[in-house]
Image: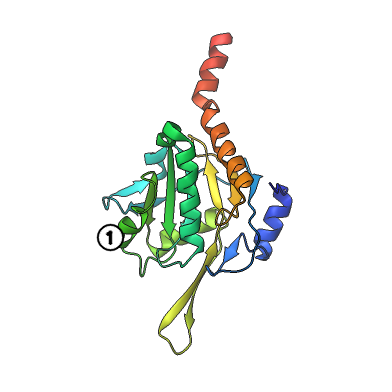
């Protein structure tokens, strides 16, 4: 599995040069590969306020404290990259067995104009039950994307009345306290060994003691 350095990753992200970071959701001949980057401490804690598609309730990051979270941006009419990524995340969750109950995949739509809560609910129901659709206002979406340096754009297609959507395809991994740990790229078409390695990365975060547990341990031994 390719493991670029944090410095290299953020240089590519800032320049918008990497297919794994920005995609127009269209097929190409990219090889099957995936990468996992340790970005611990490079980005702020998970924070957002949005509507959950399953019940329409307003939720925040606090609702998912105690769960390991995978954060992914996409949209329901994406023809390939988004469903392929969610399919592979579903496979990953299946491989984790009962541990999957401790995980939530937050699928944030970047196309709230077309993605109603009902559309998101129906779309995410095709994948693992741990995959949660979220829809925010344009300002809420922009704030969350900026917080994690996720590029996205909506551009009109001349003479059609339609528009083209492009977006970052990375999947962010957070621990139970909402601290960012890793960024996965290439989950739309990972090689089997890469998906296995990324699954192990999730296992490692699941197994890591929480900050509260560490503090209790330190107090006990002192």
**Can residue 181 be seen from the camera position used here?**
no
Q: Is residue 61 left or right of residue 51?
A: right
Q: Residue at x 51, y 17 (%)?
A: 216
Residue 4 drawn at (x, y percent)? 72, 49
* Residue under numbered circle 1: 118
**Can residue 37 be seen from the camera position used here?**
yes
Q: Residue at x 51, y 32 (%)?
A: 206
Q: For the residue carrying disc 1, how many other residues have a C-alpha within 10 Å: few (<14), some (14-19), or many (20+)? A: few
Relative to 135, say whether 93 is above or below: above
Residue that lies at the very extreme toward the bottom in this rendered image: 159
Residue 82 drawn at (x, y percent)? 48, 60
- Judging depth in this view, the residue of 67 and 221 nearest the camera is 67
Relative to 159, say whether 176 is above or below: above
- Judging depth in this view, the residue of 87 and 123 nearest the camera is 87
Relative to 167, say whether 186 is above or below: above
- Judging depth in this view, the residue of 14 and 74 nearest the camera is 74
């Amino acid at each position: 599995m390719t493991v670029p350095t944090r410095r290299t990753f953020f240089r590519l992200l800032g320049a918008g040069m990497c297919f794994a970071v920005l995609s127009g959701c269209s097929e190409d001949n990219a090889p099957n590969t995936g990468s996992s980057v340790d970005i611990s401490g490079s980005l702020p804690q998970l924070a957002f306020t949005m509507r959950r598609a399953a019940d329409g309730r307003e939720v925040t990051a606090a609702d998912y404290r105690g769960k390991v979270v995978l954060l992914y941006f996409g949209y329901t009419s994406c023809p390939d990259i988004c469903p392929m990524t969610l399919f592979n995340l579903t496979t990953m969750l299946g491989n984790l067995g009962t541990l999957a109950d401790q995980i939530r995949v937050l699928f944030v739509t970047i196309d709230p104009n077309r993605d109603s809560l009902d559309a998101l609910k129906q779309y995410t129901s095709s994948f693992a039950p741990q995959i949660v659709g979220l829809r925010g206002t344009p300002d809420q979406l922009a704030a969350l994307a900026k917080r994690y340096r996720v590029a996205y754009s909506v551009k009109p297609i001349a003479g059609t009345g339609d528009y083209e959507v492009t977006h970052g395809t990375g999947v962010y991994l957070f621990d139970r306290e909402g601290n960012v740990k890793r960024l996965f790229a290439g989950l739309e078409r990972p090689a089997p060994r890469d998906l296995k390695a990324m699954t192990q990365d999730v296992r490692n975060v699941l197994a890591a003691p929480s900050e509260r547990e560490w503090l209790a341990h330190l107090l006990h031994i002192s």
